[in-house]
Amino acid sequence: MEGGRILFLTVAFATHAVVGVALARGFTGVGPRTGAWLGIVFGLLPDADFLFPADWGWPFVHRGLTHSPLFALTVVAGVYAVAVGTAGRRGRRYAGVRRTRATALAAAVAIGSHLLIDSLSPMGIQWLFPIRTAWSPGLDVHGVIATTLLWSVSLAILARRTDDLDGVSEWARDDDSARHPSK
């Protein structure tokens, strides 16, 4: 694989992870650690199709099965079922239900963000899977401008809706005062 392709994929993967984390943390009731893990894992999950052997063919190709709303709904239902089972074993009623819903919602917004971003790209996604058809407006969602915009909006969500970025500003202040003790 050539260097340009590796750089493109690295930035695309990082973008899907950052957007997933921002949405999971910014719009659900999950905690910082849980939101980060759910955002990263489910923000990247549709690209698990890169791990399929090439000779498997359709629908195990990039933007096949894993890039469909049917796949996303199945995954979110599975997350909800696992979360309900975990909450039930711990004997938690009300708090467990809230946490279960928040966990499933965080997984849903993270995986949904990936599908939404990729659906806008020229290749599109499989909206009607298992019917093999894709539609897209053909936007350059993984280009420099769109990537910068996605990262900026994600960081703004984290800054506005969570306290996740407070640690970064504290670190910056501590580092600055270490260099300039007179402050």
Image (cartoon, rainbow, N blue to C red):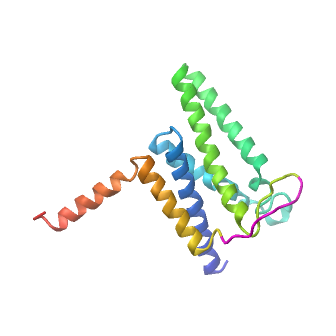
Give the magenta part as a residue range.
Answer: 131-140
Residue 143 locus on image (x, y percent): 61, 73
* Residue sitting nearer the eye, 175 or 108: 108
* Residue sitting nearer the eye, 176 or 7: 176
Residue appearing at x 28%, y 61% in the figure: 172
Rendering quarter of residue 131: bottom right
Tell me the quadrant of the picture where the C terminus can be found: bottom left
Rendering quarter of residue 17: bottom right
In this picture, residue 121 sits left or right of residue 105: right
Residue appearing at x 61%, y 32% in the figure: 83
Instruction: Name the magenta segment's main secondary structure.
Output: loop
Rendering quarter of residue 58: bottom right
Asked whether 89 falls inside the magenta stretch, the response is no
Above or below: residue 21 compared with residue 1: above
Above or below: residue 123 compared with residue 154: below
* Residue sitting nearer the eye, 1 or 38: 38
Asked whether 134 falls inside the magenta stretch, the response is yes
Above or below: residue 70 compared with residue 102: below
